[in-house]
Amino acid sequence: MQPCHRRAFLLSGTSALLTACHATGGKSSFPVTKGENGNLGTLVDPFIGTGGHGHTYPGASVPFGMVQVSPDTDNTRWDSVSGYHIDDPTMLGFSHTHLSGTGVGDMLDVLLRPGQGRVTLDPGSLMHPQGSYRARFRHEDEQAEPGYYRVRWPDEGIVSELTATGRAGMQRYHFERDGEAFVLLDFTHGIRTDNNRPTRVHDASLCWSGALLSGSRMVSEWASGREICFALEFSPAPHHVAFFVDDQPAADGTTTVSGTSLKAVCHFGRARDIITRTGISSVDVNGAKHNLATEITDWDFDGVRARARAEWESYLQRIGISGATSHQHRIMRTAMYHTLLGPTRINDCDGRYRGLDRQVHTLPPGRKDAYSTYSIWDTYRAEHPLLTLLCPERVPDIVQSLVEMMKQSGGQVPVWPLQDVDTQCMTGYHAASVVSEAANKGFGGIEYAAAWRAIRRRAFASTDGGMGEYRHRGWIPADRVGESTSRTVEYSFDDWAAAQLATRNGARADARTLLARCHSYRNLYDSHTGFIRPRLASGRWAEPFSANEMGHSGQWRDYTESNPWQATLLAQHDVYGMMDMMGGEGKFLSFLDGIFAANPALPPDAPPDISGQMGQYAHGNEPSHHIAYLYAYAGRPWQTQDRVRMIQTQLYAPRPDGMAGNEDVGQMSAWFILSALGFYPVDPTTGIYVFGSPLFTYMHLQTTGPRALVIEAPEASDTRRFIRGVSWNGQPWTKSWISHQQLANGGVLHFDMADEPDYTFGKEHKDRPPSLGRT
């Protein structure tokens, strides 16, 4: 773990208190903790996740923004896929697009680097910064808050500040020393998925009109062939703009250049202060110009920063909390911040956006935004369910955007779409879960029939990713398809999600087939070893086998960022079926205890994603996220409560390396938020939330229902983690779960907490969570 770095924005002093309203409209006796000067944003630490394997960035954005203007410290290694890592001592500059917490990198478009004196075009490297345009910086000279970032480069005496709107970024530079000022635009810069070559840029162009610098390029890294366009203005205007092609100067007076390696240097004479404003578009340069003209109409940097802060504040206020520790408040508020960074809007202000067919589309009447940046393999589990409670007004557009992608791609189900490219990264077809969840929760404005047509094609006709083998055999042979074990179990879950859509669309025969198929994961269960494991085309088990293996051979892994321990519990839709498979409730409980008690050792070929371990439970990756909640299905909710609180307090911390693994576009944070509220969606398609252990004494959520949702746990503390009783709207509640509809309509959910387990709460079968229609 990395040591905590001190940063200028860390605040001292006591929190102000604000009295929140109860769901009934009266005053609550519970004070809601606010930040300094009443601003919740001061409790957000954007540096959480920038260390370890968190892969977050500290720069400026607004909720669901297209633009993320942030410092870049490296663009070559896995732990800097966001462009920034807390361990890096030098900085390249500030680019306008970033990914939050992903396991693969891309973006880092339109890098600006302010400077004085001699111009250097070489970016150097993290290990060899000498003679390059990299700048040394210190973490005590950094400041970050939602919508704002600041850093001072001590060797050069340059202070840079960043802020953003939804589709534009603003940068303000102050030069402490006298000298010839310039701003370098490095249009070759971006993530490099291969360190042995530069970023793959093609069809790039730059144009200087005398008042505005604009350009476009295509980038073929992870999202191969994505297009990005920009429009950039300066105050004051530069007196000269010099272009470089392949680091060679273009002729004097050149106003337009094209190629694959383009840079521009804008000279300002002895200016002490420079402001830039940049619009971004994936459609065309005119779209970038329009976005800029619409969203930043003047040079008031502080005004744009204030509007970004206000927008963040409006979202952070959707959950009021009190109780617990100051560290837990900071973790909670930062988690909210991270969950609201994605998915990201991709449409311009005029409603145009580029679809997966690479064509330009326009939003129809009634649609506000089109979205991208869906890390669905991760986010279907908790991020999307959280948004149905926290931001229900955005859910129709977020889900309909997935449906539009299906239509634009000829009926393909998107897997990991980024801008106008589906990277097809990860396994399963989990968009089925996101769509099914929205349907079951009653969200309108979504073309469910069109979604079903595409999902049916994936389920019944596609052969991608071993689907043909899966349909034919009921499992995927490990000697024919990589990650076959995880694929088989994940397809089983997706079949369950698809079956619900089939039923909704009147396709009863298809629904019956899918319901039968959703048990296919059992075909890989070996009763002799007690694990789900890889099986060969011959029907025999793959050998050798180890419970912590990645695969049976060096050809490929048989599991997706997991191993047999996690894969055996991956059928989150059929918990009682897993119990039957293992031989009953007792053996199921023994396996659950075993995963937390197992030796945490991993083989040398284990991916770094398997992290945050408690035994072989690996919270740093998503296949484990529902596991602690499975005890409730076996009548042991007190063990769920105990495990969840351990994870909350041991695997989340308010420091740069305070995340157990990749943040994954909100999923890691969404787990914390929902668990802190006291519940979690084991099977997100059903709208059923299983109780865990509420972290705060009082929580208050705005809802679209007639009342707010109030969650009370007045005795909750580090030691009082066990539920001894629950009431809902003043009436006793004996179940260990509650429905989405109840929570979304608002009411008062009251937990009585104790420091010893209540072995009777949730024990009866009638009180256990339903799974695949069973209890």
Image (spheres, helix red, strand yellow):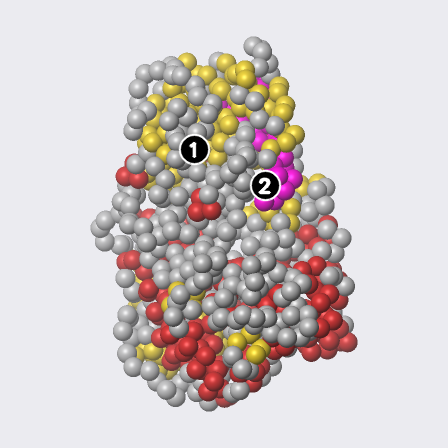
Pointer 1 or 2: first along the chain: 1
Question: Which structural element holds mark 2?
Answer: loop
Q: CA distance from mark 1 to mark 2?
A: 19 Å
**Which quarter of the image is occupied by the C terminus?**
bottom right
Residue 439 appears in the figure: no
| Residue highlighted by disc 1 | 125
Q: Residue at coordinates 32% horizontally, 60% vertically from top-left?
A: 328
Residue 114 appears in the figure: yes
In this rendering, the answer to whether 762 lies above or below 383 is below
Q: Amino acid at mark 2?
A: Glu
In the visual, does 301 lie left or right of 687?
A: left
Which region is colored magenta? 207-235
1 vs 2, front mark: 1
Residue in front for this viewpoint, 498 or 474: 474
Can residue 286 be found in the magenta stretch? no
In this rendering, the answer to whether 362 lies above or below 609 is above
Most extreme residue toward the front is 544
Question: Which structural element holds mark 1?
Answer: loop
In the visual, does 135 lie left or right of 766?
A: left
| Residue highlighted by disc 2 | 221
Q: Main secondary structure of the magenta part?
A: strand
**Which quarter of the image is occupied by the N terminus?**
bottom left
- Labelled disc at residue 517: none
Q: Quadrant of residue 59?
A: top left
Give residue 513's position: percent from left, percent from top.
73, 76
Can residue 215 be found in the magenta stretch? yes
Q: Residue at coordinates 67% horizontally, 63% vertically from top-left?
A: 480
Residue in front for this viewpoint, 432 or 650: 650
In this rendering, the answer to whether 262 lies above or below 170 is above
Q: Residue at coordinates 56% horizontally, 85% vertically from top-left?
A: 580
Q: Residues within 10 Å of mark 1 (few under 14, many from 20)?
A: some
Give residue 500's position: percent from left, percent from top.
67, 72
